Image: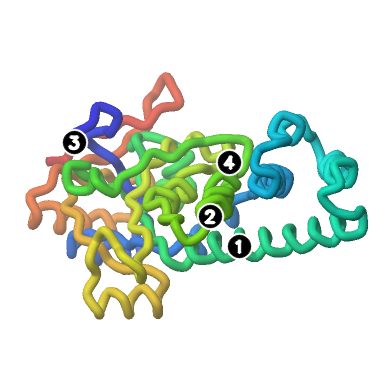
Amino acid sequence: MSKQIPHIVYKYRNCSKYSIENLKNNVVWCSTLDNYNDPYEGYTTVSFLQYYKAFLNIKTNNHYKTQIDLIKNDDELVDFVVKEKIGSYKNVKEACEQHKKFLQELHKKQRDNNIQNTAMCSFSEDNNNGLMWAHYSDSHKGFCISYDTDQMQNNLYKVKYKKSIFNISDELIKILQLGKKYKPNQNLPSQMCIQKDIIWKYEKEWRLIFSGIDIDPEFRFDKQKMEELKNKKGFLYKLIPKAVYLGTKIEEPNEREILQIARAQKLNAYKMEMDDDNYMLLPKIIF
């Protein structure tokens, strides 16, 4: 296993019937991107200027490459084309608008395809993150499950946190340059899924990602799972837990049921306790 991949990751859960049932059945839910709480999931941006400059380099056979590379905005781009008599001002304006429309449609198609055809499940590096317990485990009334990453490393990716949105311009330029010779970037769907706003950095997230589900999936789904995905926007995926961690405020009936499952599956069980001196949650072993 790569040293960059943690040996253990954690899944925060509430105590819904669905969550407890999944624990009992050794499965996790992989959801399509539109079911996530962040509207920017799978969201990408594109630079028209970057794209059109690449188009000009093709059109002019790189004769004006140095000048084109120095263009800083759309107005400078139009002025350059008019000055070099590549087209009339009116035609250049029209061409720019046509290219913008085409690029927007191509970009939307790429993005929508990724959102509809990619499913994933999220995990964290930590099991003692107070915000995670609050946000994803019903204000500490839920539980957390640990998983050995050996069973998911081929599809496990670390989330990158940035202020800017993932830019897909380079890939669209390749489509422009190569035409029919273009071969889809197999890593692009996962790349589009692992860049998030820096505000989410506290989650220390890793994602189990399955992309291109109805085209040529790395993980071969059967017909039943395909129908699951289309109808429910996700599917169940088999993962064997390693241990369970109970929240500090978990209610007694839920605690009893989860511990019963843990004993039956021979899992280690812990309960999170509040440290007396620091804002810190510490796991105390139950068995």
Q: Are there few (<14), some (14-19), or many (20+) residues within 10 Å of tag 3? A: few
Nearer to us of marks 1 and 4 is 1
Residue at image location 18% in from the left, 64% down from the top: 25
- Residue that label 3 marks: 285
**The N terminus appears in which quarter of the rendering?**
top left
- Residue that label 1 marks: 106
Which numbered disc flags the more N-terminal residue, 4 or 2?
2
Q: CA distance from mark 2 to mark 3?
A: 55 Å
Q: CA distance from mark 1 to mark 4?
A: 24 Å
**Marks 4,3: beta carbons within 8 A:** no
Q: Is residue 107 left or right of residue 127?
A: right
Nearer to us of marks 4 and 3 is 4
- Residue that label 4 marks: 197
**Marks 2,1: beta carbons within 8 A:** yes
Residue at image location 35% in from the left, 35% down from the top: 126
Circle 2: residue type: Ile
- Residue that label 2 marks: 175
Residue 83 at x, y percent in the picture: 89, 41
